[in-house]
Image: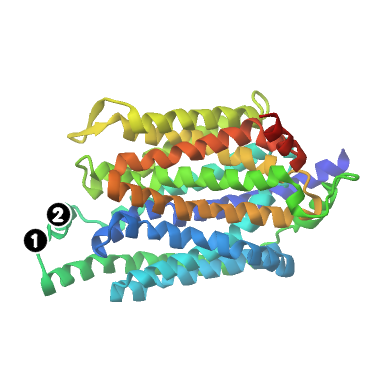
Amino acid sequence: MDNVQSRQPSNLLPMIMLGMLFFIFGLVSWVNSILIPYFKVSCELTHTQSYLVALAFYIAYLVMSIPAARLIGRVGSRWSIMIGLWLMSAGTLMFVPAAYTRAYSIFLTGLFTIGTGLSILQTVANPYVTILGPIESAARRISIMGLCNKIAGILAPLLFAAVILKSTDHELFEVLKNNNVTGVEKDILLDGLIRRVIIPYSVLSSFLFLFGCAIYFIRLPEVGNSRQEDMVHNGSDRKSIGSYPYLIMGVFAIFFHVAAQVISIDTIISYAESMGFNLQEAKIFPSITLSCALVGYFLGILLIPRIASQRLMLRISTVGGLILSICVLFIPGTIQMYGHTTSLSIWCLCLMGVCNALIYAGIWPLAIHDLGRWTNLGSSFMVMALCGNAFMPVIYGLIADHHGLRTGYIVLVPCFLYLIFYAFYGYKINHWSELWRLKKEK
């Protein structure tokens, strides 16, 4: 008991540092919701091409998570955090030459570099939060980190719009979209529009670099190895990571969860624009969705584990997400906002933030419990699954280009169906034979 009490104060500094990191995750990640329509206009892209922003950003999680785990094992948590922040600094700095040349490929390269840095930070941070205290309250700690992430997400599109956009841009966007100008005059307008990102991204690059330097002077405990050794139960550690079906299925659960979440946030501005909103007006919708997510995180902090278990909250959230997905596709009715007639479906998309908030927090502890010496690698697989953010928006864009923006949201339904399977059954499968037995019974 005395030993536990002596440990608890040392968790405060890591939790504060993790909160700052999750705030940075949100600031850099959720600004994509406004970068997508902004690039669509300034770089003259289709819906599908504009969603390459998400693909370039999040594909780094798939490519770099295993190397990130090896890096962490070699240099430790503190140096890994520093390297991750410096890579993000380099990626944001790439926006400067990209803006001067209006080269979308350079922007995508910068986004991939930012994603690489984030993949390192996520590989450090997520298991760190999970094992920094009792596994039964891990969802509560993840909810606290989620608050930091989503508060930054609420601010990111609003700050970007405040710095980048002007009150007269509605007329400019209409002129560009309708091709009312051509040739040199159009190039001048597009160059001026895209170069507005130079100053804010230069400032962000400097901040990330300096924050990385500051980490050197902060002593963070290396909790991973000792805590993971404590998690190895007698006779439960297995020969390969593939022998943990609840982990493997949890990886797919994270994949489909983040896919559903990013679609509900990164596509909502374009969906609002289809209802007559301009970019200045539509920028509020990602913040509304993320504000709904804050409500979900507050519920997690208040209810888990004292009133409701993290498993129960996960089940409620996945079922709620499926219901809202179906409503997005089929709910009738409209409501007036800013002088525009908006479909009720966009508000169902916003409310999805409440459900999505607790899904991520619920999956992580269920997927990496009792992995023992495989915890680091298992966590890397979970971070790799964040590449769901990369693929699903592009699939949505393809459907939207050919069948309409609202129809594109059909991709949400299979995502939540799988999440319901994992929340009710998948997390309980300790051996693959249990799954095969279920198939034979069917």
Residue 176 higher or lower than 434, as above or below:
below
Q: Say left or right for 333 vs 140.
A: left
Could you tell me the amino acid type at mark 1? Asn
Answer whether residue 17 is visible to the viewer in this image: no
Using the image, determine if residue 263 lies above or below residue 292.
Answer: below
Q: Is residue 183 left or right of residue 290?
A: left
Residue at horizontal 64 percent and vertical 38 percent from the top: 139
Q: Residue at image x 42%, y 30%?
A: 324
Residue beneath disc 1: 180
Whether residue 353 is visible, yes or no, is: yes
- The residue at the point 55 percent across, 52 percent down is 386
Q: What residue type is labelled 2?
A: Glu
List x then y, in percent, for residue 230: 84, 48
- For residue 314, which quarter of the picture? top right
Q: Which mark is residue 409?
A: none
Which labelled disc corresponds to residue 174?
Answer: 2
Question: Relative to residue 137, is residue 153 drawn left or right?
Answer: left
**Percent x, y of residue 261:** 46, 43
Label 1 crowd bin: few (<14), some (14–19), many (20+), radius 10 Å = few
* Farthest left residue in view: 180
